[in-house]
Amino acid sequence: MKIKSIACGHLHTLFTLVDGSLWSCGWGSCGVLGHGDSKYRLVPTVIRALEGDQIVAAAGGWKHNVVVKEGSSTFAFDFERRT
């Protein structure tokens, strides 16, 4: 696996691979990693919701991420407040 780019958020990291896939690890509370759960992940894990898409760019923020997919469409995932 070859890494194309790395983006860092507050407590998490995103990795775009040369094959266009997107991986994340770190603080996963309330879905910030994009895996549909709240797990803290020490090992980078592919974001299954984006499988098959070619990721052009990714940016991490405090409690959110924004991804640009090939064709200029965007995908965002962020902290979800739970009451």
Image: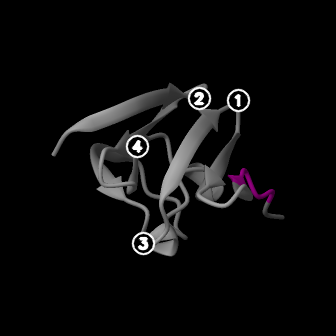
Classify residue 10 as left or right of residue 14. right
User: Alpha carbon of mark 1 to alpha carbon of mark 2: how far?
Assistant: 5 Å
Task: Tell me what residue is drawn at x 41 percent, y 48 percent.
Answer: 40
Q: Position of residue 59 (x, y in %)?
A: 63, 34
Circle 3/circle 2 CB separation < 8 Å = no
Give yes or no for contact between labels 1 and 3 (Cβ–Cβ under 8 Å).
no
Q: Quadrant of the C terminus?
A: bottom right
Q: Earlier in the sequence, mark 3 or mark 2?
A: 2
Decide: few, some or many residues near mark 3? Use Cα within 10 Å; few <14, some 14-19, many ≥20: few
Mark 1 or 4: the one toward you: 4
The disc placed on residue 16 is 4
Q: Which mark is residue 51?
A: 3
Question: Over which residues does the magenta segment extend?
Answer: 77-81
Q: Earlier in the sequence, mark 1 or mark 4?
A: 4
Specify the amino acid type for callout 2: Gly
Looking at the rendered structure, the kind of residue marked 1 is Trp
The amino acid beneath tag 4 is Thr
CB under 8 Å between discs 1 and 2: yes
Of mark 4 and mark 3, the one earlier in the sequence is 4
Residue kind at label 3, given as amino acid type: Glu
Q: Residue at x 49, y 40 (%)?
A: 27
Q: Regarding mark 2 in the picture, which secondary structure is present there?
A: loop
Q: Which residue is mark 2?
A: 9
How many numbered tags mark residues here?
Answer: 4
Say which residue label 1 marks.
62
Magenta span: predominant SS is: loop
| Tag in front: 2 or 4 | 4
- Does residue 78 belong to the magenta stretch? yes
Label 1 vs 2, first from the N-terminus? 2
At 30% from the left and 54% from the top, the residue drawn is 19
Query: How far is disc 3 from disc 2 in space, using C-alphas?
Result: 21 Å
